[in-house]
């Protein structure tokens, strides 16, 4: 059995479950450990280019409007791998290669692989996806045990809130800065488990552009910025786009030092373990006095006010 993963989240879950011996054929943006060990079969036309948030959004929007794609399959590599199964996705054809694009190349192979689209909308979908992946490899029991362990971590957070009678706070999580995108799909569910509520989010649906005046009117207690594909250091470069906006300094979250910048993989990468990491980090960000996290997770986000005072 050989499986290929054309979705970084799937690759991450395969490694998390210890099933990487069955994996070969990944994308250019899969986790570093996989890139060091596996053949890359999906490439990106803009690899190596340094672009701003606005430039990235413009290029993706123009390409999509023209019916094109920035991703492509390295067909000779894929033929040499000859996978039995390829995991694809249809959550977002802007961020990653989609099933239709993969199918064009896969159906040319002498042995046509089975295509399994991993397309979650909710957090529960992500957990079910983990079991689907393990089952396709013939290790369903591994997937069930993996999900059980992760759900126990989530229940611990919920039980703590109940025991301490913690009241939820208003939260806004942004998936992009320029233009401004709210959060969607499973992220609002993560926020809910962590003791927050994001009234500008789109649960189980796509993230969308939101106007600045709507954010000002909402005036959340906690603001979390985690642009898709960006780690903290990259997001810091684009914070000027927010700080230049009118009313930025008057936002409740800004005045109270409750603006956080976080690594994208805890939110927009739909691997079950990284999303649970995200819930634990969200609980710490939203209710810092009531939760503790590991040193490793504490390095996945920063308090923006504290960061500025330390520069």
Image (cartoon, helix red, strand yellow):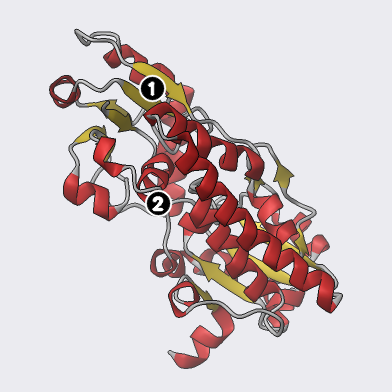
Dot 2 or dot 1: first in sequence order is 2
Of residue 139 and residue 57, the one placed in the foreground of this image is 139
The quarter of the image holding the C terminus is bottom left
Measuring 34% from the left and 48% from the top, which residue is drawn there? 18
Q: Height in image: 310 above or below 29?
A: below
Q: Is residue 22 above or below residue 163?
A: above
Density class for disc 1 (Cα within 10 Å; few <14, some 14-19, many ≥20) is: few
- List the residue tagged with mark 1: 68
Q: Nearer the viewer, mark 2 or mark 1?
A: 2
- Count every numbered label the image shows and give the total: 2
x and y percentages locating residue 40 in the rendered image: 21, 37
Q: Is residue 53 above or below residue 300?
A: above
Q: On screen, 220 above or below 174?
A: below
State the mark number for residue 16: 2
Residue extending furthest front? Answer: 141
Residue lying furthest bottom in this view?
A: 310
Q: Is residue 45 visible?
A: no
Residue 228 lies, in percent from the top left, at: 48, 51
Q: Is residue 6 left or right of residue 65?
A: left
């Amino acid at each position: 059995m050989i499986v290929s993963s054309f979705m970084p989240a799937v690759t991450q879950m395969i490694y998390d479950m210890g099933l990487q011996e069955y994996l070969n054929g990944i994308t250019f943006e899969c986790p570093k450990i996989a890139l060091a060990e596996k053949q890359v079969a999906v490439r990106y036309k803009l690899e190596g280019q340094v672009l701003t948030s606005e430039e990235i959004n413009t290029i993706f929007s123009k390409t999509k409007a023209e019916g094109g794609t920035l991703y492509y399959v390295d067909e000779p590599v894929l033929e040499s791998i000859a996978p039995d199964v390829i995991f694809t996705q249809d959550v977002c054809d802007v961020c990653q290669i989609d099933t239709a694009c993969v199918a064009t190349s896969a159906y040319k192979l002498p042995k046509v692989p089975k295509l399994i689209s991993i397309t979650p909308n909710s957090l529960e979908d992500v957990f079910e996806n983990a079991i689907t992946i393990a089952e396709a490899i013939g290790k369903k029991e591994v997937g069930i045990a993996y999900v059980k362990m992760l759900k126990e971590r989530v229940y611990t957070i919920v039980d703590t809130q109940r025991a301490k009678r913690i009241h939820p706070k208003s939260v806004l999580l942004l998936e992009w800065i320029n233009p401004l995108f709210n959060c969607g799909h499973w992220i609002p569910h993560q926020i809910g488990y962590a003791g927050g509520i994001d009234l500008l989010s789109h649960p189980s649906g796509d993230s969308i552009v939101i106007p600045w005046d709507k954010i000002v009117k909402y005036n959340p207690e906690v603001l979390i910025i985690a642009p898709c594909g960006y780690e903290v250091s990259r997001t810091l470069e684009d914070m000027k786009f927010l700080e230049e906006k009118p009313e930025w300094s008057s936002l409740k979250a800004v005045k109270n030092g409750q603006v956080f910048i976080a690594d994208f993989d805890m939110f927009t990468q739909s691997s079950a373990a990284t999303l649970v990491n995200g819930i634990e980090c969200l609980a710490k960000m939203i209710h810092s006095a009531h939760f503790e996290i590991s040193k490793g997770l504490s390095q996945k986000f920063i308090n923006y006010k504290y960061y500025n005072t330390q520069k």
